[in-house]
Amino acid sequence: MSVLVTGGAGYIGSHMVLELCDAGERVVVIDNLSTGYRWAVAPDAKLVVGDAGDSDLVKATIKAHDVTAIIHFAGSIVVPDSVADPLGYYENNTVKSRNLMAAAVACGVPHFIFSSTAAVYGNPKENPVSESALPAPMSPYGSSKLMTEIMLSDTANAHPFRFVALRYFNVAGADPKGRSGQSTPNATHLIKVACETALGKRGQMEVFGTDYPTQDGTCVRDYIHVTDLARAHLSALDYLRKSGTSDIFNCGYSRGFSVHEVIAAVKRVSGVDFKVLLSPRRAGDPAAIVAASRKIRETLGWKPIHDDLDTIVAQALAWEAGVDQLKAAS
């Protein structure tokens, strides 16, 4: 038996593969390497280069490796890009997820874990926002993920197929052992961008919007360490294997930080006072979104261990400082 990880050469997917391998699981990865890297895949995992939306490839991989669970990360994730290219996002995130589900059903794979997003909530009326809140995505990215959640639910009602959808809040940091980190080309994640600026890889960075109804006018987000997030998937896999019913869970710490607070943390940890420009709002950005995380803690028994902004920043900085050498060596 093995676990198939789509997008396992990317940022979050590579950390998932590490956690699975560390737990003694057999792992096979499908990744087209459009934003991922061969070197990011743990050496104990099998890499199949291809598209997770290619049903024939997925079916062949499932059969060849006796896949009994799929963890689906492959997709596009940049909110402003989704506003500019909605059809591309619906193709990559929704249509290809449908193809992947169809292959899973055809091959009798019973367990499916999906990387969803807090963007399905849009600009919530209350924070922390719980899983029972009415979805109201503000971008095609959020809509594309919500559509996939709906497909998962309908599929689970029609077939012997159970799923967990994990709604991520803002993922950051790097593997504490230094084996992987955020390496996506032209990444837009705040902590990644701030770390690059602190290390001189960027001459300056921008803050998009300073007039939001928050404590300092900048957006507020719940930042979750990537390793804690990967371990939430392990908990979800265990839950499904123990006959847990299909469900949706938030993945966050239930505490938010503003953009200015995050930048201050990066300056504090790095010791560098880098240049920050103040720019207008971007389309699709809610003012504040923080996770209610009681459900995942109680139902899946998830216990985060890296809930500290300075720790997240320090590990992100350490990874960013060494990633160029790693890329060159590979």
Image: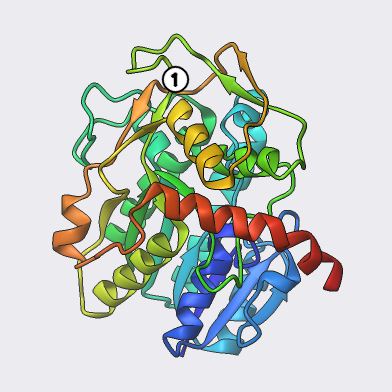
Q: Which residue is mark 1?
A: 218
* Residue toward you, 285 or 239: 285
On-image quarter of the C terminus? bottom right
* Residue toward you, 91 or 225: 225
Q: What residue do we see at 72% from left, 61% from top?
A: 323
Give residue 186's quadrant in the image.
top right
Q: Is residue 36 visible?
A: no
| Residue 240 as seen in the image, left or right of residue 52 | left
Numbered disc 1: secondary structure: loop
* Residue toward you, 83 or 259: 259
Residue 293 position within the rendered picture, expressed as x and y whole percent measured from the top left:
22, 49
Give residue 43's quadrant in the image.
bottom right
Q: What residue do we see at 48% from left, 72% from top?
A: 106
- Answer above or below: position of 193 versus 179: above
Residue 212 position within the rendered picture, expressed as x and y whole percent measured from the top left:
41, 13
Q: Is residue 225 visible?
A: yes
Inspect the image, locate mark 1, and give the three-letter code of the amino acid beneath it. Answer: Thr
- Answer above or below: position of 199 versus 126: below
Give residue 33's quadrant in the image.
bottom right
Question: How many residues crowd around disc 1 within 10 Å: few (fewer than 14), some, or many (20 or more)?
Answer: many
Q: What residue do we see at 47% from left, 49% from top?
A: 171
Residue 138 position within the rendered picture, expressed as x and y whole percent measured from the top left:
44, 23
Q: What residue do we see at 36% from left, 40% from top?
A: 222
The total of numbered circles placed on residues is: 1
| Residue 273 as seen in the image, left or right of residue 113 | right
